[in-house]
Image (spheres, rainbow, N blue to C red):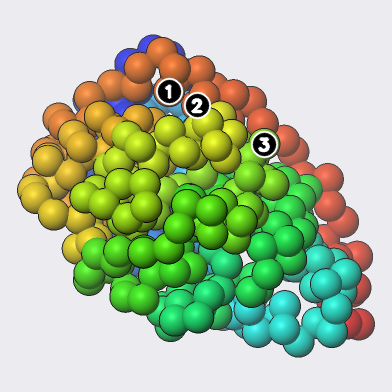
Amino acid sequence: MTVGHGAVIFGCAGPKLLSEERAFYRDADPFGFILFARNVEDPAQLRRLTADLRDAVGWQAPILVDQEGGRVQRLRAPHWREWTPPLDTVDGAGSVEAAERIMRLRAAVIASELADVGIDADCIPTLDVVREGTHPFLMNRCYGRDPDMVARIGRAVAEGLIAGGVLPVMKHMPGHGLSHVDTHHDLPTVDVSHKDLTAVDFAPFRALRDLPMAMTAHLVFAALDGERPATQSPAMIRVIREEIGFQGLLMSDDLNMQALSGTLAERTARTIAAGVDVALHCKGDMAEMVAVAGAAGVMGPDALARAEAAMAARRPATVDIEAALAELAHG
């Protein structure tokens, strides 16, 4: 890494890197990239795309994906394994210990498949605690209803990913379980006490605060900042850094979500000003990326140090995938 990376992670338009995208990424020098189903055809194509993205910026930039299992799974059959929704898997395991083992194994297998095509970060574990009224867009993506259990399953998932050669990105910090609406469309306001938030929603993130990367939540926590969503709230970023104690690289959730207001440039500027290290723009729209890059600017020294620490956490895979698959098959 070199000083001057743009404080952004970008998507791209399709399965092949376009010449105008290559030129833009060379100049904008984003910190990394994120892939979606629109970018995925087959393993050979995906290896070419990840190599081309890194070639465009001239270094081994991180390439992220949301490969949770269930509905949120960008790499799918017939080329990649299909997985049940996380909460269904955890609920069906029979015990917390069994759920830890199964989720660790499946995360390792997922990581192996991602690393094989050049993807080195997965946006899990999902550490949001299921609460009464948790919106269906999120519920079965979670790991449980008890913060201690969520932390244990989340730790197992993170360990499985790392064993498979992929970095975890925990989300949605500092907790999304109280959201009663889909933040892709609306901005939720959480109206519970700071004490309650600390005991439940913040607890899994505090337990996993040593992980290298995390993603913010687009929620208003009225007890702490009644006006701004966490992604754009200096008060909530202080909670993440000081109360929860997370010192790793903090990226926003997708800035295109309609939970946020204003132009994309305004959304980006507010996010970076609040203390988020890297703005996430997923759509792959060139005009939007130009606006986001301009508003984000370059990573400051603190953000760069956190980014370097996260990249230094990348490790070669150590898991025996055939053994993991055999163990999963036997329940």
Spatial CA distance of label 2 from label 1 is 6 Å
Mark 1 vs mark 3: in front:
3
- Tell me where residue 194 appears, x and y as whole percent: 47, 52
Q: Residues within 10 Å of mark 2 (few under 14, many from 20)?
A: many
Between 206 and 96, which is closer to the camera in this rendering? 206
Between 282 and 95, which is closer to the camera in this rendering? 95
- Tell me where residue 278 appears, x and y as whole percent: 36, 35
Q: Residue at x 9, y 50 (%)?
A: 262
The residue type indicated by label 3 comes to Asp
Q: Are marks 1 and 3 in contact (CB under 8 Å)?
A: no
Left or right: residue 161 versus residue 175 is right
Q: From what the image shows, is residue 113 above or below residue 210? A: below
Q: Residue at x 43, y 63 (%)?
A: 192
Q: Residues within 10 Å of mark 3 (few under 14, many from 20)?
A: few
- Which is nearer the N-term, disc 1 or disc 3? 3
- Tell me where residue 261 appears, x and y as whole percent: 13, 54
Name which quarter of the figure residue 8 lies in: top left
- Which is nearer the N-term, disc 2 or disc 3? 3
Disc ID at residue 154: none
Q: Are marks 2 and 1 in contact (CB under 8 Å)?
A: yes
Between 11 and 96, which is closer to the camera in this rendering? 96
Spatial CA distance of label 2 from label 3 is 14 Å
The residue type indicated by label 1 comes to Ala
Q: Residue at x 68, y 69 (%)?
A: 146
Q: Residues within 10 Å of mark 1 (few under 14, many from 20)?
A: some
Mark 2 vs mark 3: in front:
3
Q: Which residue is mark 3?
A: 210
Q: Secondary structure at mark 1?
A: helix
Q: From what the image shows, is residue 228 above or below residue 307? A: below
Q: Which residue is mark 1?
A: 303
Q: Which residue is mark 2?
A: 307
Q: From what the image shows, is residue 110 above or below residue 49? A: below
